[in-house]
Image (spheres, helix red, strand yellow):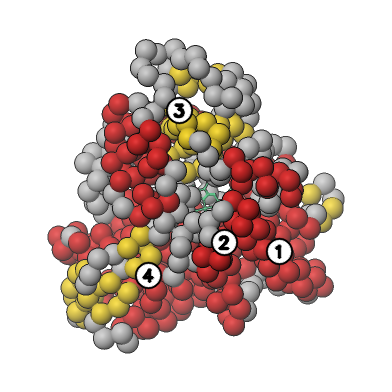
Amino acid sequence: MVSDVMTSNDSLDLPADIVATLVDPKAYADHRLHDAYTWLRKNNPLGIARSDRHDPFWVVTKHADIQSVSRQNSLFLNEDKSVTLVSKRFDELVRGISGTSSLTRSLVRMDAPDHPKYRALTQGWFMPANLRKFEERIRETARASVAKMMASGGRCDFVNDVALHYPLHVIMQILGVPEQDEPRMLKLTQEAFGPEDPDTARAKEAALTSEKLSEAVMRVVNDFGAYFAPITADRRANPRDDLASVIANGKIDGEFLPERETTSYYIIVATAGHDTTSSSTAGAIWALAEDPAEFAKVKANPELIPGLVDEAIRWTTPVKHFMRTAAADTELGGRKISKGDWLMMCYASGNRDEEVFEDPFSFRCDRKPNRHVAFGYGAHLCIGQYLAKMEMRILFEELLPRLKSLSLDGDPKLTQATFVNGPKKLPIRYELN
Ligand code: HEM
């Protein structure tokens, strides 16, 4: 239970309207979320959210506190309770099905001693030195995406026409999934990440009850498992230069990974590497379309493209939160945290922290330093960060020199989801050089 003891004199419980915003997927699709974060950073940067549907949780909104929780990975754990915000009912159903806090057992759901062992299997593969081998292949994919956009004749929906497919294609190539299966992977990824969004098919079908939602997620997990089982068998028999071969042939303490862990590894690589990167890519184009001066600056100075990439990831912060559970009584940001307490690290709030970022709501390609926490921090720091940044850099290197002008062509729309969200519609108008 969340402790009622505090070491400062501020009030502990957050106002009901703020809590309602934090747990409402619709609020993530408009500015209410950032208004709530701004209020929290100013008035109660580390308070408790109490809602009827959820176990109480601490809401960590300051950059320094997010880093402090993430850094202490034996004190703030990933495995005991869900690492994403779920309702009490959903949690109960998941525990009923799996006996644990999650239907999958992937890196983000593990603690030491397993976490470092499982992470070590692919860590080297995701480092820049290995990724450089894929640069030319990724550039070809980027060129094909740009060519498709150019064929749209000056107007397009950047999300559906470019941003969604490009990172999907890259990650599937790297993973070793054949191109004809990508639509199936796209659907599964969106269902795994955005089951709260009314535009994803199974959520409509599920009518958003916890029972239906847990069943829908279980079906997504099973579909992924069924899809990847023959791939595992194939890569054990005929290893290739792809990530599926690394996962399929990886051994922990001399044994192949158990089935649940193998499927979970594929799921996290397929899903974590897709929606996040596409949202950040679309975020960059959204910001540049709204700000002609920034667009002109990066066009005139292509060496700013890596800065554009980092700023887009900070500004969009597609992963809105991860949760941790305290392993012991401790203190954080002047609050007394008790063993078993659940904490929500609000990355998008940390990335607008006025004490760390000057003018945090403005988009600046030349922001330096840009120590955002969009990739998390500490032992679980995003393993795919170099891949994500490389993909985005290459796409912008191919796209920006072709564009003379860029502007919005209607209202962008964001997905409704409390975990990973970002642009789902970005109508733009552009002229070519
Ligand atoms: C802009 C794009 C991306 C963003 C914003 C992002 C964000 C994150 C965040 C916030 C975490 C949790 C870190 C923590 O708990 O401290 C994470 C973990 C992870 N990400 Fe990413 N990610 C992105 C792209 C990718 C890509 C391209 C891949 C791989 C293909 C990937 C694979 C993973 C994996 C496997 C983990 C779990 C690491 C662990 O628990 O040890 N991500 N990511």
Give how far apart the Cα atoms at labels 4 and 2 are: 25 Å
Task: Tell me, for residue 48, which label it has, or none.
Answer: 3
Say which amino acid is labelled 4.
Val
Helix, strand or loop status at disc 1: helix
Task: Tell me, for residue 206, which label it has, or none.
Answer: 2
Residue 333 horizontal/vertical position (percent): 42, 22
Residue 301 horizontal/vertical position (percent): 22, 62
From the Cβ of disc 4, is ligand 1 less than 8 Å away? no
Give the residue number, with chain letter if any, for mark 1.
222
Say which amino acid is labelled 3.
Ile
At x 46% / y 15%, what residue is drawn? Answer: 6
Figure quadrant of residue 417: bottom left
Q: Are marks 3 and 4 in contact (CB under 8 Å)?
A: no
Quadrant in which the C terminus appears: bottom left
Closer to the N terminus: mark 4 or mark 1? 4
Figure quadrant of residue 294: bottom left
At x 82% / y 46%, what residue is drawn? Answer: 253
From the Cβ of disc 1, is ligand 1 less than 8 Å away? no
Give how far apart the Cα atoms at labels 1 and 2 are: 17 Å
Residue nearest the viewer, comparing 312 with 338: 338
Task: Tell me, for residue 159, which label it has, or none.
Answer: 4
